[in-house]
Image: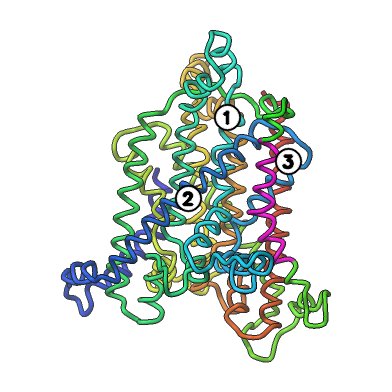
Amino acid sequence: MALPVAFFAVFFAWPVVSIVDRGLRPGGDWRFGRIGETLSRPDILDVLGFTAWQALASTGLTLLVALPGAYVFARFDFPGKSVLRAVVTVPFVLPTVLVGTAFLALVGRNGLTDELWGLRLDTGVWAILLAHVFFNYAVVVRTVGGLWAQLDPRQEEAARVLGASRLTAWRTVTLPALVPAVSAAALMVFLFTFTSFGVVQILGGDAYTTLEAEIYRQTARLLDLPTAAVLTLVQFAAVGTILGLHAWTVRRRETALRLVPPERTARRPRGAGQWALLGGVLLSVALLILLPLGVLVERSFAGPGGYGLGYYRALGSLDESGTFLVPPLEAIGNSLRYALAATAIAVVIGGLAAAALTRRAGRLVRGFDALLMLPLGVSAVTVGFGFLITLDEPPLDLRASWILVPLAQALVGVPFVVRTMLPVLRAVDERLREAAAVLGASPWRAWREVDLPLVRRALLVAAGFAFAVSLGEFGATVFIARPDSPTLPVAVARLLGRPGELNYGQAMALSTILMVVCAVSLLLLERLRTDRTSGEF
């Protein structure tokens, strides 16, 4: 636990505490009365209520839509499966501002639904909920499907042989084994929607505001750091409570599972019902995932004089306004370098943390399980400002160093590594490790011979998740990325923030490039995972 604890203490706790300290102790005197004053304001109470409600509604809707997809990807084998798995993960790495813009083009004024049926959804909360499902679909599919694909189906078949119906066998055998993964997926979706910012800014307007959006407004627009500090504490307390309850409920349901290679569980659909389920999942992916992405691609080619590559060519040159110190196209290389470094950091820190949590060594370790998820629930705006305030003097003067961006991105990637690896690590039968030790294997060799073959798939999935979230991280990166080294999300936001058709078209072009880079990276990961896991069990 030493390295993960030190990493989170320096690069998460210290920056957040510094921001809160400056907000509640201006001039050196604590002003705790600001907490009661802020929380008694009617406008703040409305923000808190809407934040909780939309997070719960978004989580429930995401599980309802994505769990059938998790089953299909885990148990069915069909042409183009690996490509489609990569495609459904692409939305998760898109900047949330861009996700909101895509849905505005679909369901807003003069959008696709408005032109075809005269239907607009941007005047209510449905556009926000659908955008959250679009963004978090891959979380459920990969987190739940990753474990579901490795559950031995013969356990459920044995229950059927003993007289249980198909539903009873699934409810008593498979469902309890999936509860930790479903809980972890629901937790991540809730945290992301609880701290939703870009989507709400675009689709909510002045009618709907979340806690994250309010922190940004109080900090960047009103320069009211005390109010922002109070809201950060509220967010921190709410997320900490949720994580504590989650850790307690999951531990009560953990059992040793019989895991097999996913190649042994996936098969072609059988019967009309399974083919109908596959068709329904493919249709939902087409409407919910592919259609918004298609809108972005179409607009990247739709120039003033018709379809062409004009916006893409413009990315390779500087404009006259001085918005960029380098051509926007250089953001591609920057994003890839930062994401690779952040992935390496997240895998090391998250892997060590998951291994420590597997040992269940007392309350300290169990509490650390919940603390690891806090970066997903604390305002990225707070973390970004905190980096600038704290990491500005020796021995940690990192403001001019390129490593600052990967460190911030790794904070978001570590929870995904932990939550992806932990259910599989805890499902490994302890008797296998004990048998290896009895046969003379050292702890390191026992881990290499017993745990690693079973965990390798989860490790690759975790690395893919960390890489994906690093590519799309925006909230903290926008404050610490150097002007001459912008990432793709930062470059897109700069272009969207400037008026003019050329800037908007270039933003769509950069977004399309980001989608392609993510899809290719995830497809390569799928190939690597399949090649390395086949024939090893």
Q: Is residue 83 left or right of residue 101?
A: right
- Residue at the spot of label 2: 189
Q: Is residue 91 above or below residue 98?
A: above
Q: Amino acid at mark 1?
A: Arg
Q: Residue, x 59% and y 37% (percent of image)?
A: 145
Q: Residue, x 60% and y 58% (percent of image)?
A: 93
Label 2 – label 3 distance at C-alpha:
24 Å
Q: Is residue 536 above or below residue 224?
A: above
- Residue at the spot of label 1: 448
Is residue 419 highlighted in magenta?
no
Q: Residue, x 44% and y 42% (percent of image)?
A: 353
Q: Residue, x 70% and y 87% (percent of image)?
A: 319
Write the start and end of the magenta stretch as one range: 277-297
Front residue (pair 84, 42): 42
Q: Quadrant of residue 512?
A: bottom right
Q: Earlier in the sequence, mark 3 or mark 1?
A: 3
Label 3 – label 1 distance at C-alpha:
30 Å
Q: Is residue 332 left or right of residue 482?
A: right
Q: Earlier in the sequence, mark 2 or mark 3?
A: 3
How crowded is the residue under tag 2: few (<14 C-alpha within 10 Å), some, or many (20+)? many
Q: How many marks?
A: 3
Front residue (pair 378, 65): 65
Residue extending furthest toward the front: 117
- Residue at the spot of label 3: 81
Q: Quadrant of residue 496?
A: bottom right
Q: Is residue 504 left or right of residue 5?
A: right
